[in-house]
Image (cartoon, helix red, strand yellow):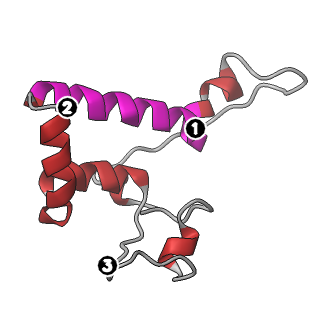
Amino acid sequence: MGDYDRTRALADGRVLIDGVDPVYMQMNPEEMFFRAMRSVDFDIYKIFLDMGYPDPFVQLVALNVIQMLWDRGETNGYAQHLTRTPYPHTPRHTVLLLGAVGDHQVS
């Protein structure tokens, strides 16, 4: 999980889960979604995903929509406002974005 104010108390032990000894893995959202579909670390999550959305295509669409919504809140989601449609009282900028293979794993 990410380091967020909503989950930090669980990760640092201030809030306990009765009968559970959780193991937390810090990762960025891109890695979470990547693992959700491909990693044994998320078997429990997959069980619930299958129960709610049994069609694999619907699962893929749902996870992509979630990712698109998340990306809007990430810094790169605002790149359009740096160049094409800047926010009020903000000058336009020139931006150089460099993509790379495996870029989803860079934090």
Mark 2: which amino acid?
Leu
Q: Secondary structure at mark 1?
A: helix
Q: Which mark is residue 73?
A: 1
Distance CA(mark 3)–CA(mark 1): 32 Å
Q: Is residue 96 above or below residue 43?
A: above
Task: Decide whether residue 75 is among the magenta residues.
Answer: yes
The residue range painted magenta reads 57-77
Task: Report x, y in % for residue 44.
Answer: 18, 58
Q: Residue at x 57, y 38 (%)?
A: 73
Q: Earlier in the sequence, mark 3 or mark 1?
A: 3
Distance CA(mark 2)–CA(mark 3): 30 Å
Disc 3 target residue: 20
Q: Residues within 10 Å of mark 1 (few under 14, many from 20)?
A: few
Q: In the image, which is nearer the foreground, mark 3 or mark 1?
A: 3
Task: Report x, y in % for residue 94.
Answer: 68, 31
Count of marks overlaid on the render: 3
Task: Report x, y in % for residue 23.
Answer: 33, 79
Q: Is residue 55 above or below residue 44?
A: above
Mark 1: which amino acid?
Gly
